[in-house]
Image (spheres, rainbow, N blue to C red):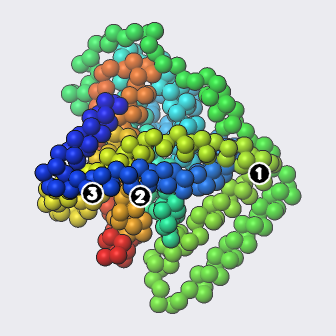
Amino acid sequence: MPAIVNWVFFALIVVSVLTAAFNGTMPKLTQATVMSAKSAVELAIGLIGQMTLWLGLVGVLREAGLLRSLANLLRPVMSRLFPEVPPDHPAMGAMILNLAANVLGLGNAATPFGLKAMQELDKLNQQKGVATNSMALFLAINTSCIALPLTVISVRASVGSKDPAGIIVPTLLAASFSTFFAVLACKLLERRKLFSMDRYGAVEIDASKLKAPDATALEKAEALAAVAPKTPLWRQLVAATIGATVVFALVSHVMQSPASESAFDLTRGILSDWLLPLLILTIVTLGFGRQVKVYEAFIAAAKDGFQTVVSIIPFLVGVLVSIGLFRASGAMEFLVSVLSPLVAPIGFPPEALPMALIRPLSGSGALGVMGEGLKAYGPDSFVGYLLSVLNGSTETTFYVLALYFGAVQVKALRHTLAACLVADFAGPVGALLVCRLFFSSAPYIAGK
């Protein structure tokens, strides 16, 4: 799948330079090259603080054993979604931990669980090299990916958004919309004769190329997930007191709100202004209540923040420069004019189309497109909100397919790709719907 991204990058550069040559916009192209590279580094620097903060808080969550708690909550649902997998089979446990880690936004912790789940599912597979119904559904759910948009919040904050956390609930709703259609598509397509496993014989595979999950990372993740320390009574009382105080403050805020303010506007305001601080308070209180050394756990996990941001700088530079050239050359305006009639019937902003197209191909690419778009259109404009929600409504489909199916040498995907593409289409539609619900009063583009 990286070859697709290579072709996209190559095409953007070639089209931009050729368009500028015919349009006489070479001076703008030269300036865009310098400014886009500079913007990429500035964006990365702005991310360091936010990424460090969230990685630290996530470390507290893991030490507190929340991953295991979420896994227990997901188990009844998973048993119904995957009836072919015995409830006590290792595949079920690995899938649950993978999805729980994704919900918390722990992408690095989710990957080893996902690889382990695929290997365990393959042990139940009677036709090696052919994707089973459970494999297809697991992959489709992963590509729709309901997760806290922590990175998106960080990017929005780094570009000066006054409401960086306002996209949390809309993003979760859009991702839920995508996941619903991913599951529905899987369940409907797996019954079609076109995708029946009877059409496939066992596919020859090379066992020497099987990719095993990182044992060290997997053991570490399982150990963190299993943490569930007993909570002393006095710590429970402290946590309960903090919770009661917050509830009282929230009720007081609601009571003092203007009578003219609608219930929806009041709820949206609370979600935007209160959700992020309360999330931080909840994480810290939960860690304290479970005897986690909160500060030490925070520092230990936060150390990876700088390294994480540094590692994405090359990707950001590549994407932002190519997109910057594409915009400065006039090719973006031409593309928008061509696609506008196609997306106009559903009211989808053409400015957000690049984001919708690149999200299934590259996570780092989508991050770069979003950052560039937020700078161009404003993070708190309607287009800015839509770009932000789009980034969290689906996952990097082709990367996930290549990684997880490559781990067990699955070559016959059956209905997996079709279901994932349904999720990729449903995600932007869901993002548009929730953005129209939550952000209809925002300016279409900043300053307009």
- Percent position (x, y) of residue 443? 34, 74
Taking the image as shown, residue 109 lies to the left or right of residue 178, namely: right
- Relative to the observer, which residue lies in front, 300 or 149? 300
N-terminal of the pair, mark 1 or mark 3, is 3
Q: Image quadrant of residue 444?
A: bottom left
| Residue ID at (36%, 17%) | 129
4 or 131, nearer to the observer: 4
210 vs 354, nearest the viewer: 354
User: Residue 62, how many percent across, how many down?
Assistant: 67, 43
> Which quadrant of the rendered structure holds the N terminus?
top left
Where in the figure is residue 354, as x and y percent of width and height?
29, 51
What's the distance in space between the residues labelled 1 and 3, CA to CA? Answer: 50 Å
Residue to which mark 1 is pinned:
294
First in residue order: circle 2 vs circle 1: 1
Q: Are marks 3 and 2 in contact (CB under 8 Å)?
A: no
Look at label 3 and name its amino acid.
Lys
Callout 1 environment at 10 Å: few (<14), some (14 to 19), or many (20+)? Answer: many
Q: Nearer the viewer, mark 1 or mark 3?
A: 3
Q: Which residue is mark 3?
A: 28
How packed mark 3 is, by other alpha carbons closer than 10 Å (few <14, some 14-19, many 20 or more), is: some
* Mark number, residue 388: 2
Q: Secondary structure at mark 2?
A: helix
Residue 100 shows in the view: no
Image mark for residue 184:
none
Q: Quadrant of the C terminus?
A: bottom left
Give the number of the mark in front: 3 or 2. 3
x then y, percent, for residue 374: 40, 61
